[in-house]
Amino acid sequence: MKQFSKFVGLDVHKATIAVSVADAGRGEVRYIGEIANTPEAIEKLVRQLRKGDAHLSFCYEAGPCGYGIHRQLSDLGWDCQVVAPSLIPRKAGERVKTDRRDSLMLARLHRAGELTAVWVPDDAQEGLRDLTRAREDMKHLQRQAKQRLCAFLLRYGKCYSGKSNWTQAHYRWLEEQQFGQSVQQIVFQEYVDTVKALSKRVDGLDTQLESAASESVFWPVIEGLMALRGVNLLTATTVVAEIGDLKRFASAPQLMAYLGLVPSEHSSGATKSRGAITKTGNAHVRRVLVEASWTYRHPARKTAHLQRRAERTSEAVQDIAWKAQKRLCARYRLMEGRGKLKVQACTAVARELTGFIWAIGQELPQPAPNR
């Protein structure tokens, strides 16, 4: 294991970085000062700190500034950790928070080994993740626009009597609606145009996602996960882009805990009390897995569409996918028979689905990081 002689805590902001250094051992932590958040300033800082053949290890909190500093320091040959803010030990009762104090705390805890590093995606993986998140954001805006349009129509007593909204028949019905005031007609048309524009953007992002996923080095893993029932291209790509190498988790329960799908617990002595899921970790993956779990309400069967997707994978992956379908469908019926709410049953199914995703990940080769 490499021995570091200096541990550097960086409190990173948009324009500035507060810097503190802790020498190896039990020496006092020193506040160096504040530098500009630019590549040139960071290079200058490294040159100053490395004097005397020092071995440096940097750390900073994960946040809105991304992984640029981590990549720059790694390319320069230095160790750098991006740490989880929610897992930083903090003293109870602390009421004073400044950039200086934060950098001193990071340097001190980094030297003590009490910080938890997060997984840092490579450039290709981060690009794929940005695409899935952009699609999620656009879908959210589309849903809001549809709700506003429906609320506007309801306010004036205009209700569609057809089977489903947002079909061609529904859009034809929308074109026929008339309002008494010209300004109301303008407002209505703006709402309709907004829905159409956002729907077009969602479709465009879906096309880009399909192209990017099929051309990426992660495609074998994505294709393998799509053998599972309920796991479509968007779900599989989101899982791979957000989690990365599934083999970095030693066990399926570890992945379940990482996604916040395990029950919370408050036990003491002989008393054991478990509550709702922890909801820690990656909310993007947790959401798509819970959505996928709703497909297991129906009996297990190999549809033609699912069979075609599964045939593109290995026999081992196909066996895992069919085993998952049989178990998870039975699991849902069992919980429903016990009187559990549908939401609770689907969440439990999502937790076990995570285990099968982990199992498929162990069968497939993971692409090497690429910058």
Image: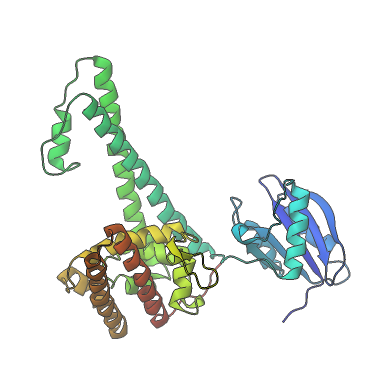
- Residue at the far bottom: name it: 315
Q: Is residue 366 positioned above or below 198 on the image? A: below
- Specify whether residue 242 is in view: yes
Q: Nearer the viewer, residue 302 or 224?
A: 302
Q: Is residue 340 left or right of residue 302?
A: right
Residue located at (83% from left, 54% from top): 31
Q: Is residue 343 positioned above or below 215 on the image? A: above
- Residue at the far top: name it: 181
Residue located at (21% from left, 67% from top): 337
Q: Nearer the viewer, residue 166 or 366?
A: 166
Q: How is the image coloured?
A: rainbow
Q: Is residue 203 left or right of residue 10?
A: left
Q: Position of residue 20 (x, y in %)?
A: 80, 57
- Where on the picture, by quarter, is residue 348? bottom left
- Where on the picture, by quarter, is residue 301? bottom left
- Specify whether residue 57 is in view: no
Q: Is residue 318 positioned above or below 284 on the image? A: below
Q: Nearer the viewer, residue 89 or 76?
A: 89
Q: Position of residue 343 (x, y in %)?
A: 30, 58
Q: Is residue 25 left or right of residue 307?
A: right
Quarter occupied by the C terminus:
bottom right
Q: Is residue 243 positioned above or below 147 on the image? A: below
Q: Position of residue 177 (x, y in %)?
A: 16, 26
Residue located at (37% from left, 68% from top): 351
> How many numbered circles does the render carry?
0
Residue located at (53% from left, 62% from top): 123
Q: Position of residue 37 (x, y in %)?
A: 71, 49
Quarter occupied by the N terminus:
bottom right
Q: Is residue 80 left or right of residue 353?
A: right
- Residue at the far front: name it: 270
